[in-house]
């Protein structure tokens, strides 16, 4: 976590130098702090060198060195931030009454006392920087090289049972043994999470009798994250041509090995399995050695990384799925009880639950089964294991699996590691909404700045593929098979095996520490809690415990307080005053009956998320570092259209650092003439009354707008939420939701008439608005619209005709819950680039005109008319 620690220090220094609220006293150390920033940036760049040298670096030495860097940087950052905060006027002594708010706040900071510490730290940084550069510049010593030469799979002994991969086995076998005259060489890839069965499937294919008789030359080589290309080629050569003799001229071993491997496979039917490949370039280098012409060549690549898997030919990439419940139980039963052991109903019931807890990962199932096979196979014990996902059986299994799982973390690029560990801060099996995790990653400082992100994706030739850094990071973690995404949940989570790894690693690196229940009181944790950067409370009831409340002072260095787990609607006391350095306070699962005024003393806070029904105090503007302000509401009943929704305080307009403002069911106050929020990029959950010309003109850089409409029973007047949206020239995402739509038998005029949308729009989500399909022409002509979701009768009526040249750039279309009966197209030039189509709960729709869309890759039909389902099945086949 050295990279994340240095990033944090960089940002701390940047705020000191650039904040409009801080004035460094002249001649008090400005030059020293500027030099410190330069050295921190240099160390940051050096650490990023790991990304290109990780296959040759000594991981053990690198971890030790990075641990030393992290400790030194965190300790120094504590000194700097504490010193600066001590010079701010005590917020506790300032009145926070609304009529005494001073704006703007300006603090003078004297850094003279830090000059000696800064000088000493710069020397330490230079020394650590040189040590890390030495690790980057010097390959592994000879004894380490000997350990990374690949080894062939030992096929002797008992064969492991393959469960749940029969379809993939049949498909790949068919690819290997047929149509060879049309495709001389075929490359197939298997990819997915560690332990999902890639090597097992590859071995089954390699040993299949029919394949044995088909290929003259075969080689199976396991590579891993550390390798020597010469060793790989030598291993392949020994397997395909054991009698070969090498003549090495002038030390050109690599060139000679490439030539000999090529000659040994030329004009031969060959099968090469490259197992556990970690680098796309290495994969390409090896495949290019193998003959592409001739009679027939087959290459099978297994990898955890989608980037590597993409070397496969079109339609030859196989992402291996998790086992379903039946397959999981079949594998566990075979490993624990065997075929002959009688399995009673009680044993089977407990066993199925245990198998379900393994979450479909074969490695977990096999490891748990091995532990259970050595214990008494009685119903009482198995029921005890089945009743608790945190039982020692699972913990022991995850510990045993760590040797297989850890490389997935260790060999992530530096800038992804903190984001991966952070996903483990939430409860086990917890789906984290994309917006929440993206905001938190950004608030924690894990993501590239806009400039850094542009540089990174341009370097990787991904310009235009990802609009934001958070999307790129999430995609890369998913592609690395360490993060699970779910379209229905609109979120991500970790498999329990990785969740356990993250929690273990995070506590060891002081990245975060989690309290799950009453047995985890702060007072009992002692040294484990000291100097932790983040504290995760997974059950808010813990705050009601006296020892936890009184022990908050022991975590005064905490920068983030993350409250998750079950939603708690009853008040709990939270002691925030000791957390002077707090930056992130995420507490959406706790209902606050009164606004926690203690928060206003925490001037370092830049992310605040809580559930609160009242009005925000005007003194919220004292949080001059605040960039994310998210307020959810507990259940609200709208009794009348005349009942006004609450307004945000006028002082919101003074919070110039705000990037993301999400206050459910509130209006932005009418701005003053001088009001301006230049950094605001996201405005969500606002009422239509906020969608005025005056408001939009003062947030010109807005990229995401979410409008939430709660209809009263007597609502009849039209809402003008779209009338002025055209003033938002940078808007990319627009979401408008009627949370309680009124569905009448007849189609009536919608309450929020459509107006002109900005041409910059790429994502549009409409829910419950009830437009007639004829109004679609105001949307279909948007030149940059890529994703459209129409939910819960967003449009109504029996017929939708897509006209000529509509939706020219639309890539994804989702239609759910509508009374549509007939969907037609004027011609095939409509929706020409659409890749994904999702239809759900459209019971009257009998036919889907799938002839459109030359690029259509995925058609999903859920709970619809059987005739529509049949159309989708025909397209998918």
Image: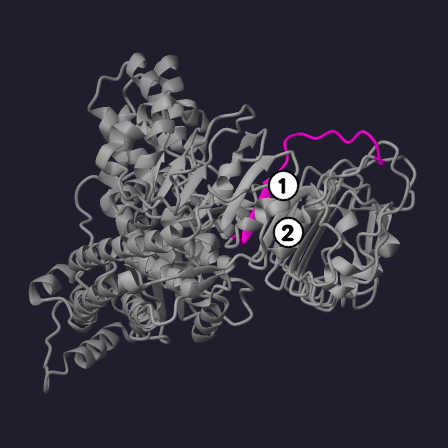
User: x%, y% of residue 789?
Assistant: 70, 51
Magenta span: helix, strand or loop, mainly? loop
Query: 688 or 674: which is nearer to us?
Result: 674
Q: Is residue 802 visible?
A: no
Label 1 to label 2: alpha-carbon separation: 10 Å
Res 141 → quadrant: bottom left
In the image, is residue 667 above or below residue 43? above
Q: What are the residue bounds of the magenta stretch?
A: 626-642
Q: Report helix, strand or loop for mark 2.
A: helix
Q: Report helix, strand or loop for mark 1.
A: loop
Q: Residue at x 11, y 70 (%)?
A: 243
Looking at the image, tell me whether mark 1 or mark 2 is earlier in sequence order: 1
User: x%, y% of residue 564?
Assistant: 47, 35
Which quarter shows the N terminus?
bottom left
User: x%, y% of residue 448?
Assistant: 44, 64
Instruction: Give the residue pinned by disc 2.
Output: 652
Residue 636 highlighted magenta (yes or no): yes
Instruction: Give the residue pinned by disc 1.
Output: 616
Q: Residue at x 36, y 75 (%)?
A: 292
Residue 128 left/right relative to 414: left
Q: Residue at x 22, y 17 (%)?
A: 376
In the image, is residue 126 above or below residue 94? below
Q: Is residue 635 visible?
A: yes
Residue 771 highlighted magenta (yes or no): no
Q: Residue at x 56, y 41 (%)?
A: 489
The answer to the question of whether label 1 and label 2 lie on touching residues, with beta carbons closer than 8 A, is yes
Query: 135 or 441: which is nearer to us?
Result: 441
């Amino acid at each position: 976590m050295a990279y994340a620690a240095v990033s944090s220090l960089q940002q701390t220094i940047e705020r000191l130098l650039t904040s409009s609220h801080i004035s460094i006293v002249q001649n008090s150390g400005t030059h020293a702090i500027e030099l410190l920033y330069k050295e921190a940036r240099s160390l940051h760049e050096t650490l990023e060198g790991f990304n290109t040298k990780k296959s040759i670096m000594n991981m053990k030495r690198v971890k030790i060195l990075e641990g030393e860097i992290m400790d030194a940087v965190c300790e120094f950052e504590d000194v700097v931030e504490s010193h600066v905060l001590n010079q701010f006027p005590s917020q506790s002594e300032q009145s926070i009454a609304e009529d005494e708010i001073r704006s703007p706040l300006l603090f003078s900071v004297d850094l003279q006392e830090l000059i000696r510490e800064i000088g000493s730290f710069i020397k330490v940084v230079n020394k650590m920087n040189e040590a890390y550069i030495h690790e980057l510049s010097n390959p592994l010593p000879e004894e380490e090289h000997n350990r990374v030469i690949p080894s062939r799979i030992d096929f002797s002994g008992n064969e492991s049972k393959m469960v749940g991969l029969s379809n993939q086995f049949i498909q790949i076998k068919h690819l290997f043994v047929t149509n060879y005259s049309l495709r001389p060489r075929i490359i197939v890839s298997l990819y997915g999470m560690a332990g999902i069965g890639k090597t097992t499937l590859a071995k089954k294919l390699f040993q299949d009798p029919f394949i044995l008789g088909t290929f003259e030359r075969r080689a199976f080589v396991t590579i891993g994250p550390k390798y020597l290309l010469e060793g790989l080629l030598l291993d392949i050569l020994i397997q395909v041509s054991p009698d070969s003799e090498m003549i090495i001229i002038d030390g050109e071993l690599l060139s000679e090995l490439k030539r000999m491997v090529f000659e040994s496979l030329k004009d031969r039917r060959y099968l090469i399995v490259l197992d556990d490949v970690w680098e796309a370039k290495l994969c390409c280098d090896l495949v290019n050695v193998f003959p592409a012409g001739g009679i027939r060549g087959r290459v099978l690549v297994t990898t955890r990384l989608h980037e590597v898997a993409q070397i496969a030919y079109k339609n030859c990439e196989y992402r291996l799925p998790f086992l379903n419940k039946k397959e999981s139980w079949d594998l566990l039963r075979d490993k624990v009880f065997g075929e002959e052991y009688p399995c009673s109903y009680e044993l089977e019931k407990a066993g199925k639950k245990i198998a379900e807890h393994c979450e479909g990962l074969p490695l977990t199932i096999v490891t748990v089964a091995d532990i259970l096979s050595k214990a008494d196979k009685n119903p009482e014990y198995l029921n005890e294991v089945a009743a608790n996902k945190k039982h020692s059986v699972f913990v022991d299994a995850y510990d045993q699996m760590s040797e297989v799982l850890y490389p997935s973390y260790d060999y992530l690029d530096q800038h992804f590691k903190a984001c991966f560990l952070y996903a483990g801060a939430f409860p086990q099996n917890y789906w984290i909404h994309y917006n929440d995790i993206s905001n938190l990653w950004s608030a924690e400082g894990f993501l590239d700045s806009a400039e850094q992100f542009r540089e990174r994706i341009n370097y990787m030739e991904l310009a235009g593929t990802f609009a934001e850094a958070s999307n790129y990071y999430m995609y890369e973690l998913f592609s690395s098979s360490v993060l699970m995404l779910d379209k229905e949940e609109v979120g991500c989570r970790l498999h329990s095996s990785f969740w356990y790894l993250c929690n273990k690693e995070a506590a060891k690196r002081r990245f975060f520490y989690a309290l799950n229940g009453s047995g985890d009181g702060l007072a009992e944790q002692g040294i484990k809690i000291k100097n932790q950067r983040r504290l995760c409370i997974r059950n808010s009831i813990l705050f009601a415990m006296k020892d936890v409340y009184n022990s908050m002072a022991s975590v005064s260095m905490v920068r983030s307080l993350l409250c998750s787990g079950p939603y708690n609607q009853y008040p709990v006391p939270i002691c925030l005053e000791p957390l002077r350095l707090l930056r992130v306070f995420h507490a959406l699962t706790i209902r606050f009956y009164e606004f926690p005024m203690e928060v206003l003393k925490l001037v370092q806070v830049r992310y605040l998320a809580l559930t609160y029904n009242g009005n925000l105090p005007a003194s919220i503007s004292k949080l001059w570092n605040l960039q994310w302000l998210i307020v959810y509401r507990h259940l609200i009943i709208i009794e009348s259209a005349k009942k006004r929704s609450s307004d945000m305080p006028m002082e919101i307009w003074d919070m110039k650092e705000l990037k993301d403002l999400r206050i459910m069911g509130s209006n932005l106050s009418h701005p003053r003439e001088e009001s301006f929020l230049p950094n605001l990029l996201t405005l969500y959950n606002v009422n239509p009354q906020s969608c005025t010309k005056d408001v939009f003109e003062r947030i010109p850089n807005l990229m995401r707008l979410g409008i939430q409409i709660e209809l009263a029973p007597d609502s009849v007047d039209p809402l003008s939420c779209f009338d002025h949206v055209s003033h938002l020239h940078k808007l990319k995402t627009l979401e408008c939701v009627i949370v309680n739509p009124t569905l009448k038998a007849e189609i009536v005029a919608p309450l929020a008439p459509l107006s002109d949308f900005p041409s910059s729009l790429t994502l549009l989500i409409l829910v419950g608005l009830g437009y007639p399909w004829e109004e679609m022409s105001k949307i279909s002509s948007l030149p940059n619209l890529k994703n459209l979701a129409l939910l819960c009768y967003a449009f109504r009526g029996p017929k939708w005709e897509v006209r000529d040249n509509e939706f020219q750039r639309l890539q994804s279309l989702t239609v759910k819950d509508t009374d549509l009966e007939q969907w037609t197209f004027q011609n095939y030039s409509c929706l020409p680039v659409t890749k994904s189509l999702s239809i759900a709960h459209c019971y009257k729709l009998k036919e889907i005109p799938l002839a459109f869309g030359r690029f259509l890759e995925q058609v999903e039909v859920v709970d619809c008319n059987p005739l529509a389902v049949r159309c989708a099945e025909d397209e998918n086949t």
